[in-house]
Image (spheres, grey):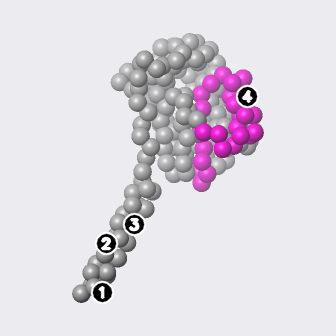
Amino acid sequence: MTIKYFSYSLAFAMAFVASAAMAHDVFRAPKKTFDPATVEETAFGRAGDPRKVTRTIKIGMSDAMRFTPSSFTVKPNETVRFVIRNGGNVLHEMVIGTAEELKKHAELMRKFPEMEHDEAYMAHVKPGKRGEIVWHFTKPGEYSFACLVPGHFEAGMVGRLVVR
């Protein structure tokens, strides 16, 4: 009887571990919640209210260190949902900002590659997965987006964003 009980217990434990491992593979981080009280204005806009999205732009990232498309235009006061898909085999990210800010941030990431951050204007996307950014563009101008994983920015993983 004890061996039978042990066998059932072992089978249950193995099934639990297997299901937990499979669940971990499909686990997605919780979506960023929009709280208007915490929204901060930047030089290129602010976090957007997902209920006010006027357009969705799909962007691909690849291990060739490129975004597709690599440039786009949005209108002032437009709230855009970016759906970012990582078609590569390594982690990529999309970070929106001014060219100067992105360059400084890329330098900082080279010095501190383990630095963790999670702002509304960035999405870290694992291989084969997708992420989202919802952004409200409040000011006309020319901005950029880039992957700031060390070495990716330097390899040319940068795009152009025009608000007009």
- Can the viewer see residue 71? no
Q: How far apart are marks 3 and 4 (CA)?
A: 43 Å
Q: How far apart are marks 3 and 2 (CA)?
A: 9 Å
**What amino acid type is highlighted by mark number 3?**
Val
- Can the viewer see residue 158? yes
**What amino acid type is highlighted by mark number 1?**
Ile
* Chain part drawn in magenta: 88-116
Q: How crowded is mark 3: few (under 14 residues within 10 Å), some or many (20 or more)?
A: few
Q: Distance between the residues labelled 2 and 1?
A: 14 Å
Q: Mark 4 points at which residue?
A: 104
Label 3 vs 1, first from the N-terminus: 1
Q: Residue 12 carries which label?
A: 2
Assign a secondary structure to mark 3: helix
Q: Residues within 10 Å of mark 1 (few under 14, many from 20)?
A: few
**What amino acid type is highlighted by mark number 2?**
Phe
Q: Where 134 sits versus 65, above or below? A: above
Please state which of residues 100 and 117 is positioned toward the viewer in this rendering. Answer: 117
